[in-house]
Image (spheres, rainbow, N blue to C red):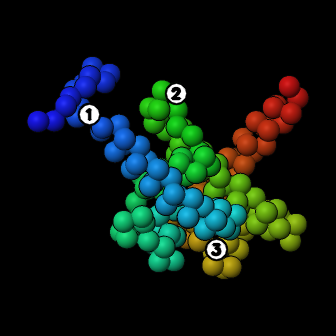
């Protein structure tokens, strides 16, 4: 007969903590194995499930990537954090979007130096250079506008943190 213990108001089999810990360690090792690939993709501006699937990078269990799987992997690697109390308040998604925006910063800077200053011209040039959006589609005015707004917000935040 199995032994049971009380943990946070719930009954669970004895030794279940060790099994849970083993699963977490295995997930950590799989994340560590993918860390360099994920960082390379982030540097290139791609951290989406579509890009991971397109490049044929399998998940830990050999399946295809989903948005939640990407967020969990980025969280496990410490590249993004969840909100207070580990409740996903959308903070992890915002941090992933911030990371993607930062990856596009050098490209946008080069385009502006080359004379592409209007939003329409930037969108057209990104499409002509076949630089995919984070979700793998084509660039539109709204997407470029939101990218530039996010980059401006990140600039303001970093400037205000430097003043402290």
Measure how far apart labels 3 and 2 are at the Cα level: 35 Å
Q: Give how far across and how far down residue 145 sits, in percent.
A: 65, 53
Residue drawn at x 42%, y 64% as measured from the top left: 60
Measure how far apart labels 1 and 3 are at the Cα level: 53 Å
Q: Which residue is mark 1?
A: 14
Disc number for residue 84:
2
Q: Give how far across and how far down residue 88 sits, in percent.
A: 45, 36
Measure how far apart labels 2 and 1 are at the Cα level: 30 Å
Task: Specify the quadrant that holds the C terminus.
Answer: top right
User: Residue at the front extreme?
Assistant: 1
Residue drawn at x 26%, y 22% as measured from the top left: 6
Task: Specify the quadrant that holds the N terminus.
Answer: top left
Residue drawn at x 41%, y 43% as measured from the top left: 21
Location of residue 116 (image quadrant): bottom right
Mark 3 or 2, nearer chain start: 2
Residue drawn at x 54%, y 47% as measured from the top left: 75
Q: Is residue 6 left or right of residue 25?
A: left
Q: Which residue is mark 3?
A: 131
- Residue 54 in view here: no
Disc 2 vs disc 1: which is toward the camera? 1
Mark 1 or 3, nearer chain start: 1
Disc 1 vs disc 3: which is toward the camera? 1
Q: Give how far across and how far down residue 161 sits, in percent.
A: 81, 32
Per the image, label 1 sits on a secondary structure element best described as loop
Number of numbered discs: 3
- Residue 72 in view here: yes
User: Residue at the top extreme?
Assistant: 9
Crowding at mark 3 (Cα within 10 Å: few <14, some 14-19, many 20+): some
Mark 2 or 1, nearer chain start: 1
Per the image, label 2 sits on a secondary structure element best described as helix
Is 58 or 103 nearer to us in this picture? 58
């Amino acid at each position: 007969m199995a032994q049971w213990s009380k943990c946070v108001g719930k009954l669970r089999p004895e030794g279940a903590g060790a099994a849970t810990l083993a699963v977490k360690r295995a997930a950590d090792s799989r994340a560590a194995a993918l860390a360099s690939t994920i960082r390379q993709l982030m540097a290139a501006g791609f951290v989406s499930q579509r890009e991971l699937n397109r490049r044929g990078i399998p998940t830990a269990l050999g399946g295809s990537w989903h948005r939640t799987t990407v967020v969990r992997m980025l969280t496990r690697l410490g590249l993004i954090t969840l909100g207070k109390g580990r409740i996903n308040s959308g903070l992890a998604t915002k941090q992933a979007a911030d990371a993607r925006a930062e990856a596009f910063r050098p490209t946008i800077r080069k385009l502006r130096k080359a004379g592409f200053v209007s939003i329409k011209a930037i969108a057209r040039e990104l499409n002509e250079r076949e630089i995919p959006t984070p979700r793998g589609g084509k660039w539109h005015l709204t997407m470029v506008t939101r990218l530039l707004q996010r980059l401006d917000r990140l600039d303001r935040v970093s400037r205000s943190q430097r003043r402290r």
